[in-house]
Image (cartoon, grey):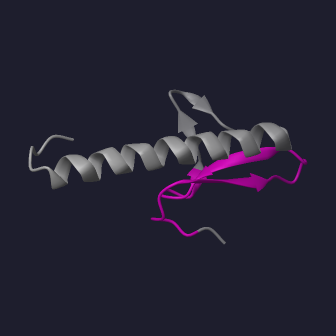
Amino acid sequence: MLNTGDPGYSSKREDDGSWSIIDRETGTVADIGGCVLRRLDAGMAAGLVEDLNKAHALRRGQHIAVHKDGHGRD
């Protein structure tokens, strides 16, 4: 079961054997810049989850660092 509200991405095997990338915050198939991330092979899904989670962590880290230095920028 997916934990909605949990930031980041995971993969899910679909009934047809393909893979989708799930946005854990919304619980839906991820849509990145208009590209819906479904019907992928296992290798592509694993690579995308890793890359998306790294990018997410960097954004989150930058956001936290900005707040801590007191500049108030996002």
Residue stretch rendered in magenta on the structure: 3-28
Q: Is the residue 5 above or below the residue 45 in the image?
A: below
Is 73 on the left-hand or right-hand side of 39? left
Q: Quadrant of the C terminus?
A: top left
Work out which residue is located at the far top of the displayed protein and give it. 34
- Please give left or right for residue 45 compared with residue 29 in the image: right
Q: Position of residue 17 (x, y in %)?
A: 90, 48
Q: Residue at x 72, y 40 (%)?
A: 47
Q: Residue at x 49, y 41 (%)?
A: 55
Q: Number of numbered discs present? A: 0
Image height of 57 relative to 27, above or below: above
Q: Quadrant of residue 15?
A: bottom right
Counting from the top left corner in percent of width and height, residue 51 is at: 61, 40
- Quick one: 2 or 72, which is closer to the camera? 72
User: Which residue is at the front of the view, 71 or 11?
Assistant: 71
39 within the magenta span: no
Q: Residue 54, percent across and down?
A: 54, 45
State which quarter of the image contains the N terminus: bottom right
Question: Does the rendering let one see residue 9?
Answer: yes
Q: Residue at x 50, y 27 (%)?
A: 33
